[in-house]
Image (spheres, helix red, strand yellow):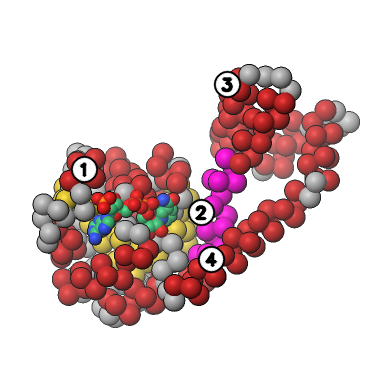
């Protein structure tokens, strides 16, 4: 095995998010073996990709246990409420040193470590939906026994679906209010710009095209130029011109503070959910 190759991976629960990660890993050419499990045969069929072994638990009830026992990295992709039960089932079959990776929102590293014991390094992550198109932002946080090498392996795994940022676990919820929920903020802005275009008399299809392609084009310009967004904004904003008037209205409407308030509200909700679930 070369440094570039990822160790054998099991993804237990490959739905929207787990499935996106499996697709990224499979397409990267870095996989040395990927096994995925789902409950139903329909879901398992959707995951039959080159280099991927896809197991339906309704056909092979031991599938999770066998996949977990054979892998060096086990990614837990089921819904948060199902995580503790799945961990209790696989724990006796994990080999010491197997890295367990969580994508479950709101389930703490402590919950994982308590069930899995000290011989199993844990890395908690928070991906976002652009991972589906290889443009995700994934925050990762190391558990108490995860070494720099374990974190590096998990970083390479998530880099197959985009960008990776390492943070302490105490900041995972805060990261989630930015990059986890962030795609929804962007979609809301696109909806509102579309509505403004409709208000100016454009057909909805044309309005959507204008608003959507402007967001996509601006994001692509930002990426390709490597410029600061404030500088790119200045380039569209002639002194005393039309854009300057529009930006002044947006800033007068409190845009500066509204993202801080919105993300504070998301963070407060994450804390409420954690308190309710005891996770
Ligand atoms: N979606 C997001 O935007 C997002 C973002 C960040 C984090 N996450 C996290 O990702 C996790 C999954 O969310 P999701 O949106 O991907 O949900 P999802 O689409 O429902 O995927 C969950 C998958 O788990 C399978 N499954 C259920 N029980 C299983 C078991 N015992 N063993 C193996 N597979 C099992 C399900 O298969 P069947 O349908 O066949 O039962 C389903 O395909 C959650 O913990 C969530 O917090 C999601």
| CB contact under 8 Å: marks 1 and 4 | no
Q: Is residue 246 left or right of residue 128?
A: right
Q: Quadrant of ligand 1?
A: bottom left
The answer to whether one can see residue 233 in this image is: yes
Report helix, strand or loop for mark 1. helix
Q: Is residue 182 magenta?
A: yes
Q: Is residue 215 magenta?
A: no
Q: Residue at x 37, y 50 (%)?
A: 17
The mark closer to the camera, 2 or 1, is 1
Q: Is residue 58 above or below residue 240?
A: below
Report helix, strand or loop for mark 3. helix
Return the x and y of residue 82 as percentages of the image width and height: 31, 65
For residue 98, which quarter of the picture? bottom left
Task: Report the magenta residues as a range.
Answer: 171-187
The N terminus: image quadrant: bottom left
Mark 4 — residue?
Answer: 270
Mark 1 — residue?
Answer: 42
Mark 2 — residue?
Answer: 180
- Cβ(mark 3) to ligand 1 < 8 Å? no
> Mark 2 and mark 3: span between their CA atoms?
28 Å
> Mark 2 and mark 4: span between their CA atoms?
12 Å
Return the x and y of residue 16 as percentages of the image width and height: 35, 47
Q: Residue at x 54, y 60 (%)?
A: 175
Foreground: 103 or 135? Answer: 103
Q: Is residue 96 above or below residue 182?
A: below
> Mark 3 and mark 4: span between their CA atoms?
36 Å
> Mark 3 and mark 1: span between their CA atoms?
35 Å
């Amino acid at each position: 095995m070369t440094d570039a190759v990822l160790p054998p991976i099991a993804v237990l629960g490959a739905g929207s998010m787990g499935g996106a990660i499996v697709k990224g890993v499979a397409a990267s050419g870095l996989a040395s073996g990927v096994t995925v499990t789902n409950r139903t045969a329909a879901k398992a069929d959707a995951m039959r990709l080159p280099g991927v072994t896809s197991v339906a638990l309704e056909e092979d009830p031991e599938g999770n246990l066998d996949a977990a026992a054979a892998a060096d990295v086990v990614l837990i992709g089921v819904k948060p409420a199902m995580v503790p039960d799945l961990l209790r089932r696989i724990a006796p079959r994990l080999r010491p040193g197997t890295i367990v990776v969580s994508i479950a929102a709101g389930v703490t590293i402590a919950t994982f470590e308590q069930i899995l014991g000290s011989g199993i390094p844990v890395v908690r992550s928070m991906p976002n939906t652009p991972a589906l198109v290889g443009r995700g932002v994934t925050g990762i946080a190391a558990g108490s026994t995860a070494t720099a090498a374990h974190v590096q392996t998990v970083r390479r795994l998530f880099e197959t679906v985009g960008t990776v940022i390492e943070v302490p676990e105490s900041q995972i919820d805060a990261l989630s209010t930015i990059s986890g929920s962030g795609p929804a903020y962007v979609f809301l802005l696109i909806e509102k710009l579309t509505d403004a275009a409709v208000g100016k008399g454009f057909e909805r299809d044309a309005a959507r095209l204008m608003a959507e392609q402007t967001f996509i084009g601006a994001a692509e310009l930002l990426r390709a130029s490597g410029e600061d967004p404030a500088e790119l904004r200045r380039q569209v904003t002639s002194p005393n011109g039309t854009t300057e008037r529009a930006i002044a209205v947006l800033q007068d409407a409190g845009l500066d503070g509204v993202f801080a308030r919105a993300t504070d509200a998301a963070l407060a909700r994450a804390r409420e959910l954690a308190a309710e679930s005891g996770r």
